[in-house]
Amino acid sequence: MDVLNLHHLRLFRAVATDGTLTGAARWLNLSQSALSTQIKTLEATLGHDLFERRGRGLVLTEAGRIALDHAEAIFRTADDLTATLRETGQARRPMRVGALATLSRNFQMQFVRPLIGRADVDVVLRSGSQAELLRDLDVLALDVVLTNLAPSREAGSPLLVHQLAQQPVSLIGTPTRVGTLPRPLLALLAEEPLILPGPGTSLRLAFDALAARLQLAPVIAAEADDMAMLRLLTREDAGLAVIPSIVVQDELTTGLLVEAAQIEGMSETFYAITRERRFPNPLLTLLLKY
């Protein structure tokens, strides 16, 4: 069995990044023929062609894409090993945080705030779908994933689910729409157009169940999966929004928006998902206390 050569993987990654042998060879300070020979050796080791020529460039084959994904995971693991086992006083430790694309930006900032401004920390923030983020967490490309969707955890799963906070959900709107006289929740839901989280979200499912119990047919002014868009729609006075107050905490503080009523029985839970690791990022201990 051939032994995989990490040097060949680094050369392969350089060619995949540049898209040409000429450019990669120049960057690596190698001759084009030497680089080509090394790539052919790696292809022979793996038993598959990694590139196909298109015009003047090279594109990855399906096997090449798989190889590149694994190569990136290998190098990330190597970087993590170096940062963990060979700490120096001058090192900047990365904290790689993934967040569900639709998650409240205010909540994300609240989570990483203890690290902002520290000279020894490099905060890296990424957004994506839950599946993408958990996949990156599994290959150590992320240290933690922030979400409002608790993942299913099968027996033997390396995932660790930390409940960070449970935020109440309210009806929130502009002062003009809410008015100065308090109105019962039922009246607000029946009389005002509503801005709702998109279908299929946990908040929308909870709201639809509430509307069914109350036998309401609410007027829906707008729907959005993204919390930032819900916030903007509320500021534009499209209606009363069904959202956790943390999403619009700045507007509530300044009086741009006000809370019309809190919706009893509805809340949004925020989670931090980590992975079992022998050498976890020590910065997580600080963040998970909050």
Image (cartoon, grey):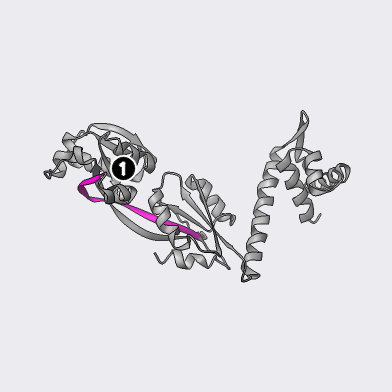
Q: Amino acid at mark 1?
A: Leu
- Horizontal and vertical percent for residue 175? 20, 41
Q: Which residue has dot 1 on it?
A: 205
Work out whether residue 21 or residue 248 is closer to the camera in this orientation and state it: 248
Q: Main secondary structure of the magenta part?
A: strand
Q: Residue at x 33, y 41 (%)?
A: 231
Which quadrant is home to the C terminus? bottom left
Note whether residue 5 is visible. no
Residue at the farthest top position: 55
Q: Residue at x 34, y 38 (%)?
A: 232
Lateral position of residue 72 relative to residue 112, left or right: right
The quarter holding residue 226 reads top left
- Horizontal and vertical percent for residue 141? 58, 54
Q: Is residue 271 magenta?
A: yes
Bounds of the magenta segment = 257-274
Badge 1 element:
helix
Which quadrant is home to the N terminus? bottom right
